[in-house]
Amino acid sequence: MTLRKARKEDCYHARALYYTAPGTVELRLCDVSFTAKNASAADVLVRALWSGISRGTERLIFQGRVPPSEFERMRAPSQEGEFPFPVKYGYASVGVIERGPAELLGSKVFALHPHQTLFALPAEAVFRLPEKLPERRAVLAANMETALNAMWDAQACPGDRIVIVGAGTLGLLIANLAAKLPGAEVKVCDINPARESAAKAIGAEFVPPEAIRDAEADVVFHASASTAGLEASLAAAGFEARLVELSWYGTELVPAPLGSAFHSRRLRLISSQVGAVSQIRRARWSHRRRLAKALELLCDPRLDALITDEVDFDALPQQMPLLLSDSKGIATAVRYR
C-alpha cells in the first residue's frame, strides 16, 4: 500500500481489520501517530509484511462468543474498541521498521499487534527476527509461545508417552516440541485425515481417535475445542497422567465427561493459558524472554507445513468466513502488498 502522509507531520494513514458484528469484518482507515523526533527516540514505525490469524480465538470473536466476564482479560496488545463489537483484534504481526532508532531501521520484527498495514510501537514492544527465521513463518510466534507454556505446564519429560488431541496450529506446535524430547513417543490425533502430512512433517505419528483409547499416555494435551476431543483425551490418559486443557470455548457450555475412570485413574486436569508464564518457570522467565525463545524455536523449516493458507489483506472481508470455518486447513498467513 502506498501511504500518504497526513497533514500532521508525524501522523500516517493505515488500514486495519475490525470485527464489526457477528460474521462481519471490515477494513477501516485509521491514523498512526509516530512520536519519534530523532534517531535516539524509542518509538518505531513498522510496515506490515505478514500477519497470522489465530483461528480459535478469532473465530470466537467473529461469532460474538466472548463472554462478558472475559472482556478485559481477552484484550490484546494494541486492541482498539470494546467487546463484543466493533473491535480491532489480532496478535501476530510481522513487519519491517521504517522509522525509529538508526540501529533498528530495516529490521524485520514480530509484534503482538492486530492486522494493520502500518503501526507504531515502543521499541521494546517489537522483537527482531532471528537471522534464520523467514518472515512468513514468524506469524506462528504467538502460537509457539502458547505451545512452550503448555509444555512447561505439562512437565513433559524425555521418554514420555505423549498424546495431542487436535491437530490445529497449536496442537501441531506442541507435537513439534514434544517430538524433540529424547525417547518420547508422540501421537497426534484428529478427525481430519488431511492433517496427517503436517503431523508427519514435524516428526509425530498421526492416528485416528479410536487409536488412542487406553493409550496409557503420561501426558495428554487437548486442543480440539470439542466435547468429543475432551472425552478422547481422558480415555488416552494413563494412571495419574496429566491432561493439559488448551481449548477455549468462549460462551459455550461444554460437558466434562469426568465419570468412568477419571477418579480411579487419579487423573490431573490442568488449565494452560498463555496470559501468565507457567508457574514452574515464572520466577526466571518474563513474557519477553518467553516470546524471544518462541521465535528461536520457529527456526525449523519443517514448520512451514503448518501454514496451509495465504490470503491478501485486502481480501479478508470476503475470505474471513471461510478461513475461520472448520473445513479449512491449519494456519493462515495474511499477506500485505
Image (cartoon, grey):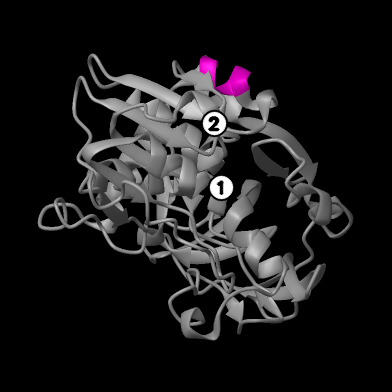
Q: Amino acid at mark 2?
A: Pro
Residue 219 percent coordinates (x, y)? 29, 36
Magenta span: predominant SS is: helix
Which residue is denoted by mark 2 in the rendering? 209
- What stretch of residues is rendered in magenta? 196-200
Q: Quadrant of residue 318?
A: bottom right
Which residue is denoted by mark 1 in the rendering? 228
With 247 as the anchor, is 238 left or right in this view? left
Residue 249 in the image: above or below residue 50: below
Q: Does residue 95 show up magenta in the picture?
A: no
- Quadrant location of the C terminus in the rendered image: top right
Q: Secondary structure at mark 2?
A: helix
Q: Amino acid at mark 1?
A: Ala
For this rendering, which residue is in front, 251 or 93? 251
For residue 134, say whether it is visible: no
Q: Residue at x 24, y 14 (%)?
A: 183
For residue 197, say whether it is visible: yes
Q: Are marks 2 and 1 in contact (CB under 8 Å)?
A: yes
For this rendering, which residue is in front, 228 or 17? 228
Q: Residue at x 32, y 42 (%)?
A: 148
Q: Which mark is residue 258?
A: none
Q: Quick one: label 2 or label 1, which is nearer the N terminus? A: 2
